[in-house]
Image (spheres, helix red, strand yellow):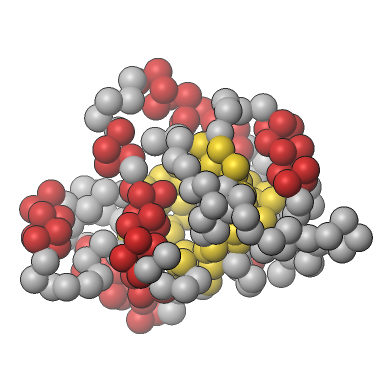
Amino acid sequence: MDLKHVFQLFLLTITIRFAICFIVEPVVLRKNELLCKKLTKTRSFQDHFITGPPWRTYYTWVVRLDNTCLDLLFRTPSNYTIKYFEKTYGDLVPNILPWKEATLLAYDEEFKLMSQMLMIPKKGSPGRFNGIFDVLQGDPNSTEREQTLKEGIAIFKFAFKLFRKGLFLLRWDCIGGIGHLMARPDTVTKVDVLSMVKALNFTRGHLACANGKTKKKTEKPKPLT
């Protein structure tokens, strides 16, 4: 898959709510919000639980990745990165954000500069974040950039929860209902994934990274860092 298609895929997986938020019924929006509250009610989430090695998506809801393996990394953003986001998007987002409180930077492992999202934790709700996607990266004269500047920048809302002692990480879009069930690469089997999906008892979704490598039955999961 070439750079263009990877970038388009990444945009699809995290920005599809631009296309669906205007047609999702209020009852569905409330359902997603309630699910996010449920996922984060234990208040046990800490950022360092998900930093370190990348997380690979093995199952999705709403979007389909099929055979594509999407790997995301989570890092602590530098002061320079935080200042860049604040300077670039501070006047474009619909609400004032506490930029200096950002604790995570998420990005595609292979194409970091084309997929960065700054994540600001929601106070009082460990595991919930407001996210700002760096949509203005790229050609400064592109029509897409001009359109973005006219329309403004959306604030994404996510909930994260770890399952089975850190083996799985669930990321849920609290508005559009896009879900990603992730694990560290090569630490789970298809059986593990489907077992976790069954335990979650959500609506039916889709297997991802169908042709990606999985661990052998005798291997132990990599430790959470």
- Residue drawn where x is 11% and y is 66% of the image: 142
Residue 72 left/right relative to 165 = left
Depicted 166 relative to depicted 110: above or below: above
Which quarter of the figure has residue 2? bottom left
Quadrant that contains the N terminus: bottom left
Quadrant that contains the C terminus: bottom right
Residue 207 left/right relative to 104 = right
Viewer-side residue, 157 vs 138: 138
Number of labelled discs? 0
Residue 216 x, y percent position in the rendering: 83, 60
Residue 179 x, y percent position in the rendering: 52, 41
- Residue drawn where x is 10% and y is 54% of the image: 147
Residue 72 x, y percent position in the rendering: 52, 63
- Residue drawn where x is 47% and y is 24% of the image: 31
Residue 146 left/right relative to 21 = left
Q: Is residue 101 visible?
A: no
- Residue drawn where x is 63% and y is 72% of the image: 52
Viewer-side residue, 164 vs 43: 164
Q: Is residue 120 visible?
A: yes
Residue 34 x, y percent position in the rendering: 51, 28
Residue 217 left/right relative to 132 = right
